[in-house]
Image: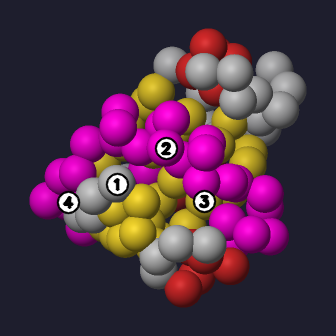
C-alpha cells in the first residue's frame, strides 16, 4: 500500500488499520477529495452509508466509515454502526459529515 494518497499522508498505524479493516485505496480516492484539511488538532470524518452507497462503495446500509485526521495526516480509520458516541467523546475535535 502507498504511504500517500492525494494530499494525505498515511501513518503506520493507519496503514495497518487500513489493511486490517479492509479500507482499500480505491475507496479512499473516492472519499478524500471531499475531506477538509483543517488546522484543528483532530478531525473526525463521518462517511455515512448514503455517501458510500452513492459512490458505489457501501458494504451495507448501517455501517459508516470513520476517518481520524490531523491536518493532512490520516491517523486511523474504522467501520462503526453507532458513531453518535463520538460527539461526546471527542468534544475538542472538528467534525465533518459526508452524507
Question: Where is mark 1, residue-wise?
Answer: 6
Callout 3–callout 2 Cβ contact below 8 Å: no
User: Mark 4 falls on what kind of element?
Assistant: loop
Callout 4–callout 1 Cβ contact below 8 Å: no
User: Mark 2 falls on what kind of element?
Assistant: helix
Of discs 3 and 1, which sits in the foreground?
A: 1
Q: Residues within 10 Å of mark 3 (few under 14, many from 20)?
A: many
Image location of residue 61, percent across then percent down: 81, 20
The single residue placed furthest to the left in the displayed view is 39
Of discs 2 and 4, which sits in the foreground?
A: 2
Question: Where is mark 2, residue-wise?
Answer: 29
Image location of residue 42, percent across then percent down: 33, 63
Front-lying residue, 83 or 34: 34
Front-lying residue, 89 or 46: 46
| Labels 3 and 2: the sequence-earlier one | 2
Disc 2 to disc 4, C-alpha distance: 23 Å
Amino acid at each position: 500500500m502507498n504511504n500517500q494518497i492525494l494530499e494525505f499522508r498515511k501513518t503506520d498505524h493507519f496503514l495497518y488499520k487500513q489493511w486490517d479493516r479492509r479500507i482499500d485505496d480505491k475507496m479512499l480516492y473516492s472519499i478524500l477529495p471531499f475531506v477538509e484539511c483543517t488546522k484543528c488538532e483532530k478531525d473526525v470524518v463521518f462517511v455515512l452509508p448514503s455517501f458510500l452507497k452513492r459512490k458505489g462503495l457501501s458494504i451495507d446500509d448501517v455501517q459508516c466509515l470513520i476517518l481520524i485526521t490531523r491536518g493532512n495526516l490520516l491517523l486511523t480509520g474504522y467501520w462503526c454502526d453507532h458513531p453518535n458516541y463520538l460527539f461526546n467523546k471527542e468534544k475538542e475535535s472538528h467534525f465533518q459529515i459526508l452524507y
